[in-house]
């Protein structure tokens, strides 16, 4: 499975979250399903979220679509990053975290 891991530092969490939530239908249309969402304890305007990716090319097209940088700026994104990732071989979920496969 492929995931898109994202971090955004935003000027105003409430404003950013309203815009983010309004894009839920577009996320799904791009093959993205939100599976995790966190806010930093030290800086609540720093958010982290993970999407499960159904189709990496559709996901890449979504994040690179014309106007996406302007939309992020209008939502108050100060900086951010995203990475497409897959589970590393040799590790599997375990009740208390990750444990090596044996």
Image: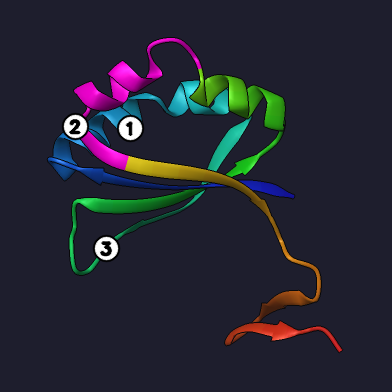
Q: Residue at x 60, y 27 (%)?
A: 60
Q: Which mark is residue 60?
A: none
Question: What's drawn in magenta, residue-wise?
Answer: 65-79
Q: Residues within 10 Å of mark 1 (few under 14, many from 20)?
A: few
Q: Residue 84: x, y in percent?
A: 61, 44
| CA separation in Å, label 2 and label 1 | 11 Å
Mark closer to the chain start, 3 or 2: 3
Which residue is the site of mark 2?
76
Q: Residue at x 26, y 63 (%)?
A: 40
Q: Which mark lies nearer to you, 2 or 1?
A: 2
Which residue is the site of mark 3?
40
The vertical placement of 50 against 24, above or below, is below
**Which SS class for mark 3?**
loop
| CA separation in Å, label 3 and label 2 | 17 Å
Q: Residue reaching furthest top? A: 66
Q: Residue 49: x, y in percent?
A: 43, 50
| CA separation in Å, label 1 and label 3 | 17 Å
Mark closer to the chain start, 1 or 3: 1
Q: Residue 72: x, y in percent?
A: 30, 26
Q: Residue reaching furthest left? A: 12
Query: In the image, 12: left or right of 41?
Result: left
Which residue is the site of mark 1?
20
**Which SS class for mark 1?**
helix
Q: Which mark lies nearer to you, 1 or 3?
A: 3
């Amino acid at each position: 499975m492929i995931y898109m891991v994202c971090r955004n530092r935003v000027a105003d969490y409430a404003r950013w979250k309203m815009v983010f939530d309004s894009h839920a239908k577009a996320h799904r249309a791009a093959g993205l399903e939100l599976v995790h969402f966190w806010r930093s304890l030290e800086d609540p305007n720093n958010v982290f979220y993970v999407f499960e990716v159904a189709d990496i090319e559709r996901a890449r097209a979504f994040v690179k679509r014309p106007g996406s940088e302007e939309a992020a700026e209008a939502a108050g994104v100060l900086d951010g990053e995203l990475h497409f990732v897959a589970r590393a071989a040799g590790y599997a979920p375990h009740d208390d975290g990750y444990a090596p496969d044996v």
